Image: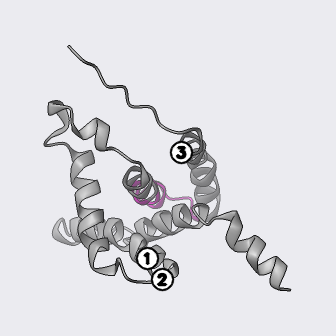
Amino acid sequence: MKFQTFLIPRRKIIELCLLPLFLLVIYFIWSSFEVMSLFAFGYVWNWAASNDLTALFENKRYRMSMLKMVVNLQNLILKPFGWAPELVKRVVRVLPAGIFWSLVIYFNESHMPWWATFLGSFVFELLQLEISLFKKHKESL
């Protein structure tokens, strides 16, 4: 029986470990558990979608998992924007988690801050900015 191991890269682990720090900042700004939880949902959604999970999905236990649904929804929404510049792709990556959780909030008729999921996704995408973008800008000055 062949077992495939799934190891998360060090950078992805660091990105996930930064979440409690962001949640602490969010708590001090808004003092709301709802904002913190929806921020975490958006952040973790984009974190999960940014990992290469093909080895994990080959395992039959993950055929119908929530993780696979997140990755499939993210890829479905991003597919039409494959031609777009990187900035447009980053903006579009913020949308799936926010739209999904906004619909959940709407259908449950909850009075929760729908924008917090977009904010969590946006913060994660800001972490994804490559240092080379800043180096190119610095060299042009």
Question: Considering only order in the chain, which callout, 3 or 1, is on the residue closer to the N terminus?
Answer: 3
Q: Are marks 2 and 3 in contact (CB under 8 Å)?
A: no
- Residue at the extreme right of the image, as rendered: 141
Q: Which residue is mark 3?
A: 12
Q: In x, y percent, where is residue 86?
A: 50, 77
**Is 99 positioned to the left or the right of 37 in the image?**
left
Q: Are marks 2 and 1 in contact (CB under 8 Å)?
A: yes
Q: Which residue is mark 2?
A: 85
Label 2, label 1: how many angstroms apart (C-alpha)? Answer: 7 Å
The residue that appears at 82% across and 78% down in the rendered structure is 138
Q: In x, y percent, where is residue 83?
A: 37, 82
Q: Which residue is mark 1?
A: 89
Amino acid found under the numbered disc labelled 1:
Lys
- Residue at the extreme top of the image, as rendered: 1
Camera-near label (2 vs 1) is 2
| Magenta segment boundaries in residue numbering | 30-42
